[in-house]
Image: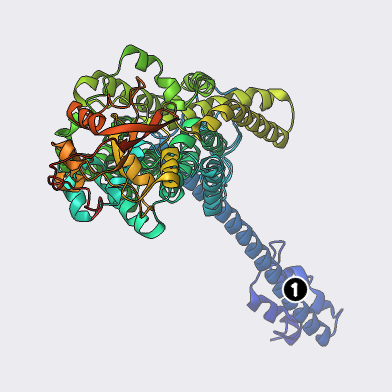
Amino acid sequence: MNRTSHPVGGADGYGDAETFHGQAPGGQHAATAAVPPGAAARGSAPAHATATTAEQIQQARHAQAHQAHQAHAQQSHQAQQAQQAQQAQQAQQVRQAEQTMQVRQVRQGDRLLRRDDPPGDQGARPDEQGGRPEGQGERPEGPEEPDETPDGQGERPGGGAFGTILVFLVPTLAALVPITRDIGERQLWRDEHATWWAATLSFHDLSLLIRSIDVVFTPYYVLMHLWISVAGDSETAMRIPGAAAMAASAGLLALLGRRMFTTQVGLIAGLAFAVIPAVTRYGQEIRPYAFAVAAVLLSTLLLVRALDRPSFKVWVAYTLSVPLIGWSHLASLAVLGAHLVIVVLARRGGDRIAGWAYGAAGTLGMAFVFPMALQGSGQSGQIAWNNPTTKDLVEFPKNLFGSWDVALPVMALGALGLFFAGRRALPLAVWIVLPPLATYVTAAQLHLFLPRYLLFTLPAWVLLAAVAVGRLAGPVAGARAGSGAAVRRGLCWVLAAASVAGLTFQALPGIREARVNALGEPDFRGAARYIEARQKKGDGIVFSGELAERRAMDYELRDDAGRPRDWLMYRTPQELGSFGALECPQPAKCLAKAERLWLVATTQDGQPFTGMPKTTAAAIQRSFRIVRTEKLTSLRLVLLERSRKETGTTGSGGDAGDREVHT
């Protein structure tokens, strides 16, 4: 065999090149692409050149493979990132849709639904606590949820706990200013004297009292008993609890308006409530009406909160607030009718547990009130004098607000606010109308139609008026004004402040009048000062009239150790379990030891003896002569001295004058 006729394997690289059997990027075999055929046979390159060419081919293959691998990895990474971004976007849209559905389901029956907002003026609604929920960006596409805020109000501000405290404190402090000014200057009147009397009794004597009268005020009397034992029984000290409750009512109303509508509406309502003359008047009253207003507002706020964000704790708090309403004043329980309307609207909006929760809360809460209400129904005769007429119905707004100057603008704005309050209009209307209507219709049986008994309806009027002010300010300061959002909101706040300032100006005369003694109230304080300056040892005191003169003078002379003796008191109120004492059936015997008498008369005809029993008046006129008469406001103070010595009288015939009035 001729050696030159066969190629040498491995000498020219063909053999090794064939064994790789790989492909170049162009699709050719690597050996074919790298070395031209027949190159070794022609002897154009030495053997080491062939080896070098093989190495270069191998390196090129590795480089090309690495570049291809990197390109493939980069493409895979980009595809993975795009897929993750798409998944994140889809998840975000799902979260937004879920949150929107939850908000609609919870708030549908409990939020104001606006249907007449101008396009482009709604804006995005932030979350209740300020801003959108976490992870929520722009509102997802789909049907827009109706805006809750009145036109021009802008977005609901947040602030969390600090914002809530601020909204509560500003109206509260504003209400404290007119309420606490000269709080001790106005004299107590007969109902306040009754509170002092009952609250300073021992618990045993109080238990005897409530068996026959005022059982419905027992929780208030117990509270005042504890307070007086700590703070004393001066006019100022006894009025502090009511002042605090009424001032807190302004703050609670602001919080209620904030939750039902917007922060601006809440602040307008709270500040307007603070300057209502009746708020000052009954904030300075030692009666439970201020506590009734506070209890109604607290309970309503808790109910709206429970429906807005249901939780077991809030429903328990609402349950506990129901007896607070009844314990403060039974007439205030009429607000539960408005609560029922709120719950019905929530059920229609899709809240399935609202009805059951409200039913359980109302039933359990009323269980603490029902025994007291049942016993109190047998004592309604104590207010049987209250038989309202048509005139009382006509003058009801004036007496409710404290003056016509305040009643007319607030009621006009409140009526207008009904058109802007959306789904909140119906419960607020029921809150306003149902209690006066129900008490007026049943006045012949229950005798509860009195403005001070219905003072708890006042916040609903003020809240609706605030809604109207906020809505009317909207078109002036809204998108139609053509200014920026900040400017519009600022102008809206200016208009709201101007409205409150205008109401304050209207209310000032009524506020000043609320701080003075009520028209026709006798000047018992002046009578007590006059007696203390001129009394002598052994003086006695007698009473003529029907305005609880004995109890009033007992309060005014409470700190006078040498006070005149009540010769005619035969049985003390504690013994009778009543507010009134039993007078001596034999006045001549009971007055046998008296040398001088101070007669406190509140008779309207100017005759000091016409307001006492005829036998008593005859005995006094027969044995005493008038020495001096002092005329005070709605009161006559007459000093009598014995004209001759009575003979044949021994003892006082069971007189109770030596007994302490309070045990």
Question: What SS does tag 1 mark?
Answer: helix
Categorize mark 1 by other alpha carbons within 10 Å: few (<14), some (14-19), many (20+): some
Q: Tell me the quarter of the picture where residue 473 sits.
A: top right
Q: Which residue is drawn at 69% across and 84% down?
A: 9
Q: Is residue 368 shown left or right of residue 527?
A: left
Rendering coords of residue 372 (x, y %): 18, 42
Residue furthest to the top in view is 390
Can residue 272 be seen in this snapshot? yes
Question: Foreground: 126 or 176?
Answer: 176
Residue type marked 1: Ala
Q: Quadrant of the N terminus?
A: bottom right
Q: Quadrant of the C terminus?
A: bottom left
Question: Is the residue 473 above or below the residue 223 in the image?
Answer: above
Rendering coords of residue 343 (x, y %): 31, 34
Rendering coords of residue 465 (x, y %): 51, 26
Question: Is the residue 456 above or below the residue 23 in the image?
Answer: above
Q: Which residue is drawn at 41% across and 26% down?
A: 520
Can residue 37 be seen in this snapshot? no
Q: Is residue 296 shown left or right of residue 67?
A: left
Q: Is residue 38 shown left or right of residue 422?
A: right
Rendering coords of residue 631 (x, y %): 44, 29
Which residue has dot 1 on it?
Answer: 60
Question: Foreground: 113 or 537?
Answer: 537
Q: Residue at x 67, y 67 (%)?
A: 70
Question: Foreground: 304 or 100?
Answer: 304
